[in-house]
Image (tube, coloured by chain):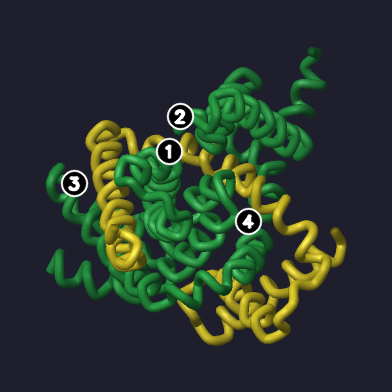
Amino acid sequence: MIETFIWLLGYQFVGEVLARSLGLPVPGAVIGMLLLFITLVLRQELPAALRHNVPTLMTHMSLLFIPAGVGILAFWPLLSAHPLAMAAVLLLATLSTFLVTLLAMKWLSQPRRTQP
Amino acid sequence: MSGGALEWVRHSPLSGVLLTLLAYRIALIFSRRYHGHPLANTVLLGAVIVVLTLLALGMDFQQYMLGAGFIQFLLGPVTVALAVPLYNNLGRLRRNAVTILFCILLGSASGVLTAVLCGQLFGMPHQVLLSLAPRSVTTPIAMGVSEVLGGIPALTATFVIVTGIIGAVFARPVARLCGVKDDVVLGVATGVAAHGIGTARVFQLSETAGAFAGLAMGMTGLFTALLAPLLVHYLLP
């Protein structure tokens, strides 16, 4: 567990420093993810510390978003001007973004399998 | 409970951490009992349980975050960890790299376009439209882009979370309705439309879907940061 967090926090740290020193518009953690991915591809092997603990970590990723979900309450006054219209806008926009990407992926990624 | 003890409960970081873990555990039980029914979403249900408990205890959001901040902190290292499932799916990524990249780019643009157009359809004020534009990407990017556009970053943060929960709730039912069985397709679409909350949701379904959702989330963040100012400038001159 200790080694796992040294890997993850270390890459996040490097990502955060890079994002700030290069003025990149992306969070340090996302840059850390790309750097770790490149490292793994170059190493062609997963260190034991990541192989064993990361899958468990990922299945519980939802836990980490509960505080943000609770935070909506704190900002409720900002939303309460038109709560229903706002919900409708977000529902429509999110579903259409999802559908556009889903259908584009479906049609482009498996042209061979759709033929009998 | 005596007044002194209740005061301690409200101000101790322990309360926020324990409450979040318990709420998540209870939400997980519901989610499993109802076989992952969309409305038994662990983020949605967990947040509702926390909010009800905070109201009962008379705790405010700042007091809750004294502890919950520790849990939120872990979002950083877990985002980095997304590289691992992606590496495990390297073969699938190589086979579909061009298609995936193109679809993420298309999805990023439609994330901004749909938000602004739907907002206009419902007659939202100009500053709300600007705050809506970056709402389909992860919070830190969305807030940064919102500021650049002239929106209200705090309002954008709220839109981001609601968008993520909507995406997490609807991803699987809509994908099934469209006859999508490929986890790569589900993952990319969810990561593009519903960032980390959607990614967390599809990780409960399959590691492959989660891996591609994580990749799509990161790339959408990057593309949106670059594209949103151009698109918004064009749509809302």
Q: Quadrant of the image for the N terminus of chain B?
A: top right
Q: Are marks 1 and 2 in contact (CB under 8 Å)?
A: yes
- Mark 2 against mark 3, which lies toward the viewer? 2
The hue used for chain A is: yellow
The residue to which callout 1 is attached is B169
* Count of all numbered marks drawn on residues in the image: 4
Residue B166 appears left or right of A88: right
Tell me where residue B75 appears, x and y as whole percent: 63, 56
Q: Secondary structure at mark 4?
A: helix
Q: Which chain is green?
A: B
Identify the residue shown where x is 71% and y is 35%.
B21
The residue to which callout 3 is attached is B124
**Which callout, 1 or 4, points at the residue further toward the start of the chain?**
4
**Callout 1: chain:** B
Q: Do marks 1 and 3 both belong to one polypeptide chain?
A: yes
Q: Secondary structure at mark 2?
A: helix
Say if A67 sits above or below B22 in the image.
below
- Mark 4 against mark 3, which lies toward the viewer? 4
Amino acid type, callout 4: Leu
**Which callout, 2 or 3, points at the residue further toward the start of the chain?**
2
Q: Do marks 2 and 3 both belong to one polypeptide chain?
A: yes
Amino acid type, callout 2: Leu
Say if B178 sits above or below B3 in the image.
below
The residue to which callout 4 is attached is B75
Amino acid type, callout 1: Val
The residue to which callout 2 is attached is B39
